[in-house]
Every structure is written in C-alpha cells, then in structure tokens.
Image (cartoon, rainbow, N blue to C red):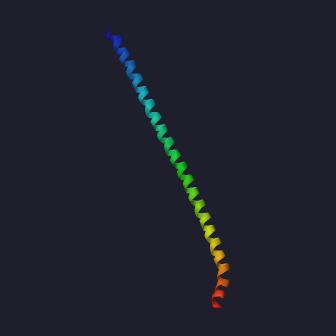
C-alpha cells in the first residue's frame, strides 16, 4: 500500500511541476506580448508626433508666407 501511495505522490509531484512550468511559460508569453504591444504603441505615438510636427511646421510656414505677403501692403498703408 505504501508503494501505491509513493507512486501516486510521485505522479502528483510530476503533474504539479508540469503545471508550474506551464504557468511560467504562460506568464512569460504574456509579458513578451505586452512588451511587444508597448513597442507597437510607442512606434505609433512617435509616428503621430512626427506627423503633427510636420503638419504644424507646414501650417506655420503658410502663416509666415501670408504675413510676408500682407506685410508690404500694410507697411505702405502705415506710411500714408
């Protein structure tokens, strides 16, 4: 009877080790997935930031260009 109990205990311990290892692998995969998702999100944020900076830079150039066109005529009006 003791042999059967020892065999069952051995099987149970082996099963427990397998489950712990499966859990470790599952947690590691989830961690790697989250890191990958964070990198993807950061890449998207960086791209959006570059797009916004380019858009605002273009908008500022257009405003400066408009001011440059308006300035000579307004300067002439101020002289009168």
Q: Tell me the residue at 40%/22% (across/down).
A: 14
Please report the residue visible at 57 percent of the width from the left and 52 percent of the height from the top.
Answer: 44
- Which residue is the extreme one toward the top? 1
Which residue is found at the position 68% from the left and 79% from the top? 69
Give the residue at the far left of this rendering.
Answer: 2
The picture quadrant where one finds residue 79 is bottom right
Name the side, left or right, on which 48 lies relative to 4.
Answer: right
Residue situated in front as seen by the camera: 32 or 55: 55
Q: Give above or below for 67 relative to 40.
A: below
* Residue plotted at (36% across, 17% down): 9
Quarter assignment of residue 7: top left
Q: Where is residue 31 drawn, in percent x and y?
A: 47, 41
- Image quadrant in which the N terminus is located: top left
Rendered-image quadrant of the C terminus: bottom right
**Figure check: 47 above or below 28:** below
Q: Is residue 42 left or right of residue 11?
A: right
Q: Is residue 39 above or below residue 64?
A: above
Is 26 or 4 nearer to us in this picture? 26
Q: Position of residue 42 (x, y in %)?
A: 53, 52
Note whether 49 is above or below 39 in the view shown.
Answer: below
Residue 66 image offset from top left, x and y in percent: 66, 75
Report the number of discs. Answer: 0
Write down the quadrant of residue 73 in the picture: bottom right
Q: Position of residue 52 (x, y in %)?
A: 59, 61
């Amino acid at each position: 009877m003791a042999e059967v109990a020892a065999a069952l205990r051995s099987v149970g311990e082996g099963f427990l080790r397998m489950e712990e290892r499966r859990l470790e692998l599952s947690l590691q995969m989830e961690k790697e997935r989250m890191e990958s998702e964070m990198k993807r999100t950061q890449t998207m944020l960086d791209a959006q930031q570059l797009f916004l900076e380019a858009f605002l830079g273009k908008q500022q150039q257009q405003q400066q260009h408009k001011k440059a066109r308006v300035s000579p005529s307004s300067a002439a009006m101020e002289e009168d």
